[in-house]
Amino acid sequence: MRQKYASLIVNYCLDVEKGDRVFISSTSLAEPLLKHIHDYILQAGGHPYIQMSVANTAASFYQYANQTQLLHVNEFSRKAIEDFEAYLVVRAPHNLSEEANVDSEKRAIKRAAAVELNKTYFERTANGSLKRTLCQYPTVASAQEANMSLEEYQQFVYTACGLLEDNPIEYWLSVRKKQQKLVDYLNDKQVIRYVTRETDISFNTKGRTWINSDGRTNMPSGEVFTAPVEDSVNGHILFSYPSIYQGKSVEEVRLEVKNGVIQSWQAKAGQEVLDEVFAINGARVFGEAAIGTNYNIQQITKNILFDEKIGGSIHMAVGQSYKQCGGKNQSVIHWDMITDMKHGGKIYADEELFYADGKVITQL
């Protein structure tokens, strides 16, 4: 299965071509998958560059780093993001809570140091000069966070990625075709409204583009997304699914929004995380609105790569906009928060009800 996974990543997600330099960031736990990725890149004529981290180095960095070290940007990462043709992140965590107790001031310094490189990353992924993919290698830490055994979590990941299909690439091509109908429908509309028992929020997408996320930038994928006109978002929303932000759990986030700016925020758990995030420049503006379409994912795992794709959910992200959608907001963060739509949720497009109880009900 690892070989099948590696082939999908290299030959479909990244579509590696002859001469492509591919920067691969992961941990030592993903070594069995990285070997296959390395080999497939070579077979495609590309050049693999692997950077692996080891357990507990993130926490110890913040413990011992001085001001100069916090402001330093990894030269290998800088070169890759500024100049390489492809960028791959294989998530394979040792400990998801490793950074939970990091000093917030040190984190802010490190975040500030990454502003320019972050801007370059979003510009290059938007104009297509940098192909990028984010994927998951099953580890014990991720399985525990999802309340699964490692074997159960492996099966979950493989199912979500379409790896149990005879031909995963053909499977994702069929997803692309199906989702394009929804994207075409939404790109012909302007005002979108999400409604649940505790949510009523609307936004304008005039001049913006809905994107078909079909596995070429995230694996798994299964969503359609856009960047709302920044000052058009109004209403209130409850994000019913929990999430993890920098090692801390955040649950039942409630936001009040007026003319695009988040006015108030509350959380059942993790209020201090919200307070820290919304002190960051650009974080009180929405950079993304989306609909999850991967019905192979039906349970929360506290891993945004999977949770935001849940078929029958919507999500919105605070912070950085996707430039390929026409978004203009800039921030060093992009944090997706998710809510369930399967129990009475509705989505309207130009006042037309096209989605109810987690599914599209309009003939597209």
Image (spheres, rainbow, N blue to C red):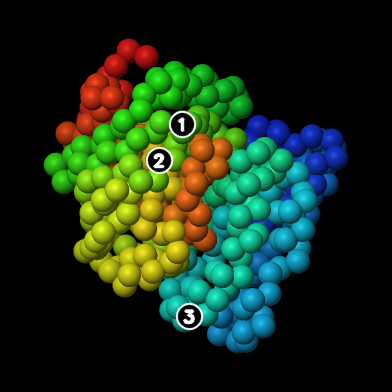
Q: Amino acid at mark 3?
A: Glu
Secondary structure of residue under mark 3: helix
Disc 1 residue crowd, few under 14, some 14–19, many 20+, Cα 10 Å: few
Mark-to-mark CA distance, 2 and 3: 32 Å
Which mark is in front, 2 or 3? Answer: 2
Q: Is any atom of residue 7 visible in this view? A: no
- Disc 3 and disc 1 in contact, CB within 8 angstroms: no
Locate residue 344: give its quadrant.
top left
Q: Residue furthest top?
A: 363
Residue carrying label 3: 105
Q: Which mark is residue 229?
A: 2
Left or right: residue 153 compared with residue 344: right
Q: Which residue is mark 1?
A: 207
Q: Is residue 175 left or right of residue 243?
A: right
Position of residue 186 in the picture relative to residue 236 (left or right): right
Depth check: give the residue in front, 39 or 85: 85
Query: Amino acid under label 1?
Result: Gly
| C-alpha span from label 1 to label 2 | 8 Å
> Residue at 48% across / 80% down in the picture?
105
- Of the image marks 3 and 1, the number of the one nearer the N terminus: 3
> Residue at (33%, 66%) from the top-left corner?
274
Q: Nearer the viewer, residue 181 or 146?
A: 181
Question: Which quarter of the figure is the C terminus placed in?
Answer: top left
Q: CA distance from mark 3 to mark 1?
A: 38 Å
Which class describes the residues within 10 Å of circle 3: few (<14), some (14-19), or many (20+)?
few
Above or below residue 160? Residue 152 is: below
Is 12 placed above or below 254 here?
A: above
Q: Are marks 1 and 2 in contact (CB under 8 Å)?
A: yes
Residue for point 25% across, 66% down:
269
The label shown at residue 103 is: none
Amino acid type, mark 2: Val
